[in-house]
Amino acid sequence: MLEINDLHAGIGDREILRGITLSVNAGEVHAVMGPNGSGKSTLAQVLAGNPSYQVTSGSISYNGQDLLELDPEVRAQSGIFLAFQYPVEIPGVSNAYFLRSAYNEIRKANGQEEVDPLEFLDLVEEKLKLVDMDQSMLSRSVNQGFSGGEKKRNEIFQMAVLSPRLAILDETDSGLDIDALRIVAGGVNKLRSPENATIVVTHYQRLLNYIVPDFVHVLANGRIVKSGGKELALELEEKGYDWLQPVAGAVA
Amino acid sequence: MSTRAPSSVDVYREDFERLRAGPAWLQNLRQQAFARFEVIGFPTTKNEDWHFTSVAPIAERSFVLASGVGSEAREGSDRRESSRRKADSVNAIGARAADVARFGFGEEGWHTMVFLNGVFSEDLSSWPDTAVPVGNLAHAIEAGNPTAEKYLGKIAGFDNHSFTALNTAFIADGAVIEIPTETVVEQPIHLIFISDGDGVSHPRNLIVAGRHSRATVIESYVSLRDGAYFTNAVTEIVVAEGAHLDHYKLQRESSSAFHVGTVQAREARDSQLHSFSFAVGGSLARTNVYTSLDGDAATCTLNGLYLTDGSQHIDNQTSIEHIAPNCPSHEIYKGVLDGRSHGVFNGKVYVHPEAQKTDGKQSNNNLLLSANARVDTKPQLEIFADDVKCTHGATVGRLDEVAMFYLNSRGIGPATARTLLTYAFAADVLATIELEPLRKALEKIVLVRFAGDASEQV
């Protein structure tokens, strides 16, 4: 589904990703872990097409398409979803309007008919339950006045409604208490399927107790310095990231 | 001291001299005002209050009175006569009930007073509750209503205000609203000033909210067709002790029009004035909202939204005089500027020495949608008391790129995302409008302006 090959990217003159190579197949869950500043979030943003980041070399192929050629909205319409580490507040636009616009834009792009507000309400009802949110949130402005946990649940709710093929969760666990973490992880797990893939970007291992990954990759200094199965996450939890730094140095 | 072409003032003088005589106090007031106007002329950009707005396009044009009042020799007189014929279902300027319904947002329950080229039209006006104490100024003057004499020219001074002087010289018609003590007028009172796209009108309104009364007044300035006409309006407001007045001014003139309007209020102890100024029309428009907090614990909220596009120039000036202590004043003005348009905001807050415990908050936020749009913003805070809490701030920015990316990342393309974010910026201040049908109507106008469609709630 996703083939990242020797990807270099950064902001302005600052190179953050220094040669990422990663392959993700349908049905898989990949965890990308690493210390602060290792480039985890940059990888997530680049996959979603954030124009603030420049890709300097390398390639990303998504279902046979050159992903780097696609604008962010086209990526979303092709099934890519990024759950933001810091969801954006948009005062004056209701969640319902925002999400239905997104839903309909994606349907339109895929040659499907748009849904009207009532149909949409039916459709989102069960998705709200998935993240334990009340219907009243639909009429509130997007993320405005939401607690940290509510914002993260709203991201997973959006993901549930838009049902992406490739979901990228950027530090979705940061700032969540254990109950919120369970709700968020439960939502993600319900959406797992053999057709979809998930990339979980996280600093901590604890999220992976709930969302069990098939693969774990450790990022340091913009490179994947170690890959393994879910047991690698436990090893990181035990030893921290420090023991990997020399490896990073050696590769450099 | 003036950029006026002699001919334009000559035309005003001709019309002034033809004005129909009124009672002595009115004649006197008009004459003083016209004399003052002749002395000070139109303001130039050297005048601090007009620094960013040149009124040359108004000063250089010759506008004849749109009502034709007093100018029997001109062709306008026929129009006036027929517009006054009460049985006319279609008056001379061609305004129909359907137009009034459209300008009145289809709110049949509201008290609606319609003025055509500045002249009251009884046919097109309606009040569901006949007990509501509203009438037109021409009638009040004829009938010798003492309120008119008592207040006209007393709240809106003209010594340093050319346009107020000019309006005062031509006082003829407008609305007189007197809310008796402890009376609550449930339905809003909507004054609709409809132009036919030609000439000048000088609507003059007087609102006196009696002690502990409550009312909502809306003023709409609209046009049947586009034209380089000029509306020069003045509204004087008295908010008596404990009274609560919501005042909305909707400047929706046609795109070639000129509009200068002043809303000037005095507030007594414990009174509240909530003003909202919505300005989207005209090629050159200026709205002044001035209030004076004369009595202890009087409060005011002055909010506004201006949207400019093309080559429009829209200027908003506000002034809050904190005379008495313990008065809170809150002000939020927002502007969205596109094309080659120019917006101006100047908000003055004066805290007089006696006005201790003043709590003043003022902000002006502008969104520039094009590289050629421009805004000049000048918050002005002058404090002469020592125990006060006042803040003010102004911002000028472009659409938030992070928010744009957030929307894009959800499949929403740049054009739609831009519309949504622009709408949201404007709707934020509209949310302060308590009168729900009006808020919805304005949201719709804004949405149509940005998206060309307003099929549903955002």
Image (cartoon, coloured by chain):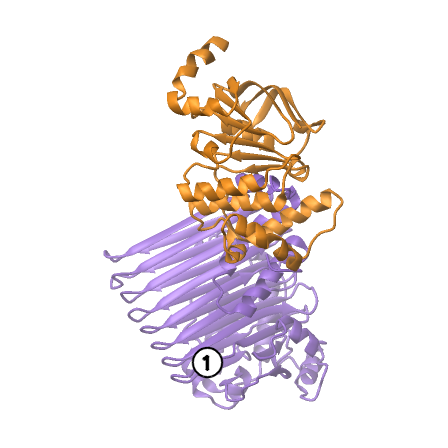
Chain colours: A orange, B purple
Indicate the position of residue B100 as horizontal and vertical percent values: 65, 75
Mark 1, chain letter?
A: B
- Residues B131 and B319: in front is B131
Q: Which residue is mark 1?
A: B28
Indicate the position of residue B311 as horizontal and vertical percent values: 63, 51
State the residue lying farthest toward the top.
Answer: A250
Q: Residue shown at 51%/26% (left/top)?
A: A32
Within 10 Å of disc 1 (Cα), the crowding (few <14, some 14-19, many 20+) is: few
Tell me which corner region of the image, top left, top right, bottom left or bottom right, holds residue A83. top right
Residue A120 to residue A66: above or below: below
Tell me which corner region of the image, top left, top right, bottom left or bottom right, holds residue B318. bottom left
Residue B303 to residue B104: above or below: above
Q: Residue shown at 41%/85% (left/top)?
A: B180
Three-letter code, disc 1: Asn
Residue B273 to residue B358: above or below: below
Residue B414 is at least partly visible in this image: yes
**Side of A52 where B449 appears, left or right:** right
**Side of B366 where B291 appears, left or right:** left
| Quadrant holding the N terminus of chain A | top right
- Disc 1 is placed on an element classified as helix
- Residues B35 and B442: in front is B442
- Residues B443 and B245: in front is B443
